[in-house]
Each structure stands twice: as C-alpha cells, then as structure tokens.
Image (spheres, rainbow, N blue to C red):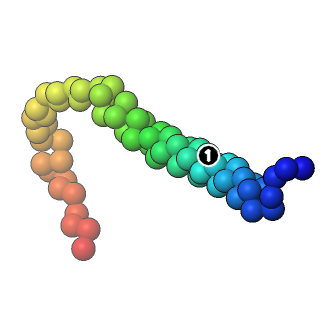
Amino acid sequence: MGENLASVVVGDYLVDVQYELLEAGAMICLGGLILLVPLIMIILTLTQRKTKETLEALEPTGASAGDPIPPTT
C-alpha cells in the first residue's frame, strides 16, 4: 500500500477517460457505417439501372374520327 490517494484517483480517472474515449470512438464509427449504408444503396441503384427501351412512334389509326372523344371539362 505504498500508493497515495491522489495516484489511485487519477489512475482510476484515466482508466475511465480511456474507456469513454474508446466507447465514443466506437459510436462514431457505428454512426459512420449507418450513414454509409444508404449512400452505397443509392450508388448501386444508379449504376445498375437498366436503360429504357426506345418506343416506336405510333401513328393515328383514325378509329375515333367519326365519334370523337368528348371533352372532360
């Protein structure tokens, strides 16, 4: 028991601070990973999107020429 009270208290305090810094760093890393998940999903969605097929131009058939569609308003 050659240790004095000050060294015991400071030693315990430093251990507590070290543990809190380790825990805070883990929370920051976890938060960073949580933020990266949506960004990775957006990047994957944009890079693996299928290209739209081109549609051929439609020509009017004249089916409603004798009986036109009435106005909606």
In this rendering, the count of numbered labels is 1
Residue situated in front as seen by the camera: 31 or 58: 31
Residue at point 81%, 62% (across, down): 5
53 relative to 36, above or below: above
Residue at point 48%, 45% (across, down): 32
Can the viewer see residue 61? yes
Would residue 9 be found to the left or right of residue 14 on screen? right
Would residue 68 be found to the left or right of residue 41 on screen? left
Would residue 21 be found to the left or right of residue 44 on screen? right
Residue 44 location (% of width, % of height): 37, 30
> Which type of secondary structure does the marked residue at label 1 adopt?
helix
Can the viewer see residue 13? no
Residue at point 19%, 53% (across, down): 67
Residue situated in front as seen by the camera: 7 or 15: 7
Residue 73 location (% of width, % of height): 24, 74
Q: Tell me which amino acid carries mark 1.
A: Leu
Residue 40 location (% of width, % of height): 40, 35
13 relative to 47, above or below: below
Residue beneath disc 1: 22
